Image (cartoon, helix red, strand yellow):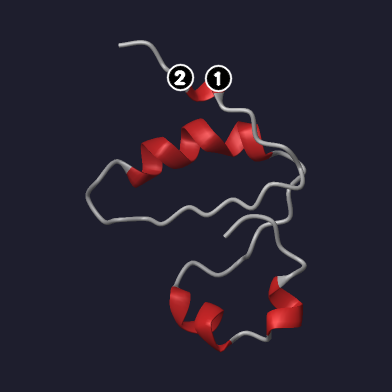
């Protein structure tokens, strides 16, 4: 199977979201996409609890969730 990860064209201004579903190769997906997102500011929280309580102005600083 050939990986299409290198064919993804993510621009620095594009919003990107990664939703992890347990037991669905999330670690593998993360390892594939991480090099493509170098330089993007990412939301540091793993769980969404803090995300939904965060201030919208604070969230605008991040490009990857």
Q: Secondary structure at mark 1?
A: helix
Q: Is 33 situated left or right of 61 in this image?
A: left
Give the quarter of the figure containing the N terminus.
top left
Position above or below: 39 against 54: above
Q: Which residue is mark 2?
A: 4
Q: Is 25 situated left or right of 14 in this image?
A: left
Residue 39 locus on image (x, y percent)? 77, 43
- Mark 1 and mark 2: span between their CA atoms? 5 Å
Position above or below: 60 against 8: below
Q: Nearer the viewer, residue 6 or 26?
A: 6
Q: Mark 2 and mark 1 in contact (Cβ < 8 Å)?
A: yes
Mark 1 nearby-residue class (10 Å; few <14, some 14–19, many ≥20): few
The image quadrant that residue 61 belongs to is bottom right
Task: Tell me what residue is drawn at x 55 percent, y 19 percent.
Answer: 7
Q: Is 12 situated left or right of 21 in this image?
A: right
Q: Which mark is residue 7?
A: 1
């Amino acid at each position: 199977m050939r990986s299409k990860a290198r064919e993804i064209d993510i621009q620095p201004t594009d919003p990107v979201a990664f939703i992890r579903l347990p037991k669905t190769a999330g670690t593998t997906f993360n390892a594939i996409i991480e090099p493509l997102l170098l330089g993007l500011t990412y939301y540091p929280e793993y769980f969404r609890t803090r995300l939904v309580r965060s201030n919208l102005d604070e969230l605008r600083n991040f490009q990857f969730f």
